[in-house]
Image (tube, rainbow, N blue to C red):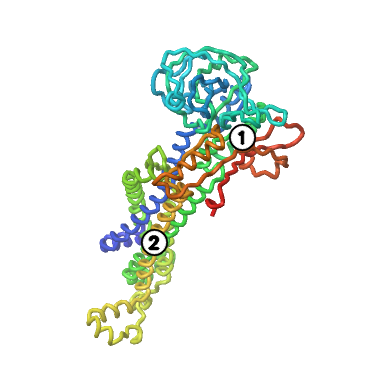
Amino acid sequence: MNIINTLTLRHLKLNKQRTTVTIIGVILSVAMITAVATFVSSFLNMMQKNAIKDTGNWHVLYSDVQSQNINSVINDANTATAALSKDIGYAVLDGSKNAEKPYLFIKAYDEQSMKTFNLDLVAGHFPQNPNEIVISAQIAENGGVKYQVGDKIKLDVGRRYLAEGGKERSLKQDTSFKKPAEDENGEKLIVESSKEYTVTGIISRPGFEPYWAPGYTVISYLDQNELAPADTVNLSVTWNKVNKKVKEQANALAENIGVSEVSYNRDLLRFYGIIGDNLLRTVYSLAAVVTVLIIIGSVALIYNSFAISISERSRHLGMLASVGATKKQKRNSVFFESFVVGIIGIPLGIFFGTLGMGITFALVQPLIQNSLNIGVKLALVTSPTTILAAALLSVLTIFISAYIPAKRAAKTSPMEAIRQSKDVKLTARNVKTSKLTRLLFGFEAELGLKNLKRNSRRYKITVFSLVLSIVLFLSVSSLSLLSQKSADLMLSSTPYDVSVLVTSSATVQEKKDFYTAIAKLDDADVAVIQQTMEAESAIDIDSDLIPSDLKEIMQPDNQRQNTETYVTRIQIKSIDDEALN
């Protein structure tokens, strides 16, 4: 260690109080930056876990993969896990009391799929061969049909079809039941096979089953070894690394094995930034704003400390200059001081920032779950990337704080150091105070005001630091209120207390009578009736004109030839004039 650094360390030890205050300032700065980075990573992790809970732990779904190509997907370098599944079909649920859910929807899963899709086993055990099934508890709770473990069920399995324009279109679980009416054909079930199953267990309603789905989910077993060469399955894949490059490689893999339908878990990938999402951009933008405010406030605080240090050390710097110290050596002495302060403050700041967020998450956990209606906990999540980002931002903050004092130290000459002419430049006019000050506040106030005027730069820095602290507090408070208000608006976009759904199977007169009865209730202040019609629109359009994110939602219509046709779903809602006003 050279003599300059040795003298710098001695100066820090002699001024323990100021050194301690500087280190505390660095710790607070680093702790706040770490808290912001930790909150972002923990929040995104919570949303990822919630998406996995609802949709399953998969990133890409290859549909209708021929059995001979299964190993091509499993052995791909990007594949971490591959879960095999197959849609067996629909069977009528005899005795169902829910007119909108008259079917059982039978799927076959291998062992990996049982884990991937988070099946919650309530009773019994999972199927171990293709002749066994587990059934949803919703069959008894919602459909009114009770099965026990060990029961045998004989089912006529087939496909749902809807006649449109002289053609039959296949329907899936995401399309609600189309009950035949007087003026339309409605859907029909075409039976393709019959099979007897043994009930081995009962599961909770799967999170991936839409509430409007026409069939209750039941799961059978899929054995890859029993697949014929012509059989097709669905492959739900998780990636080793989640990034946009892997997504492009997944598309290339699908093309190589002849898979025309590739789906991505949008609910999960949006929180990785793979699929564009406004929520992610909002979180990052708010974090950036808060971090910038923290850095500005921290720079003002730490700069003030280094500026005071240079004032105290000006005579020492002048003496060093008189014996041959170069500008670079004097400048580096300040940077070395900032290095010592940082090497102590940054690790402690990261530790206390992480600890503080852990305590905060534990306290606000019930509020977050209630406001966001999320079933997973907000757990503390740290990663090397998060810690490294916080450390680099902290190093940048300290460097900016020390840069101007370092330049000032480099320019210190022996005569200026002895006279301290740069620190205090006084004239009679500079320290002149009003007689009214002593009259109103006394001699102490006049003395204090003169002391401020002796070094206006230090006074201005102090005021600036105070202003920034207030701005930081108000900004964070405003962002918190804005987030709360946004959540309230999102969860209650329509001002109502109770919503009652009348099924589409009811006649027009029954709907009117029911609405009239509700509106006349003693406690009903305002009643509004709303009707919803779901439709699908096939659009002939050049695929190059459709954004990639939108193209994933608008599935291609393979039933039409020689045109690039995409299907998009539309919801048409209608209310009366009074309700609209």
Residue 396 in the image: state x and y as whole percent. Answer: 44, 57
- Look at 39% across and 20% down and name the residue there: 123
The residue that disc 2 covers is 474
Camera-side residue of 243 and 413: 243
Three-letter amino acid code of the residue under disc 1: Gln
Q: Badge 1: how crowded within 10 Å, few (<14), some, or many (20+)?
A: few
Q: Viewer-proximal residue, 279 or 207?
A: 207
Farthest residue toward the right? 562
Q: In this view, does 364 lie above or below 202?
A: below
In what element is the residue under mark 2?
helix
Among the 4 quarters of the image, the one containing residue 157: top right
**Residue 180's quadrant in the figure?**
top right
**Label 2, label 1: how many angstroms apart (C-alpha)?**
46 Å
Check if mark 2's residue and mark 1's residue have beta carbons within 8 Å. no
* Residue 329: assigned label: none
Looking at the image, is mark 2 or mark 1 nearer the viewer? 2
Disc on the earlier residue, 2 or 1: 1
Residue 66's spot in the image, x, y percent? 63, 21
Q: Where is residue 178 in the image (x, y as percent from the top left)?
A: 59, 30
Q: What residue type is labelled 2?
A: Leu
Left or right of 13, for residue 159:
right
**Does 479 appear above or below 509?**
below
The answer, for residue 471, to whether it is visible in the render is yes
Determine crowd level at label 2: few under 14, some 14-19, many 20+ residues with C-alpha closer than 10 A: few
Residue 381 location (% of width, % of height): 39, 41
Q: Could you tell me how many numbered marks the image carries? A: 2
Using the rendered image of the protein, determine whether residue 351 is visible from the camera's viewpoint.
Answer: no
Instruction: Check the picture and name the quadrant holding the N terminus.
Output: bottom left
Q: Judging from the image, what secondary structure is the residue with disc 1 in? A: helix
Which image quadrant: the C terminus? bottom right
Residue linked to disc 1: 249
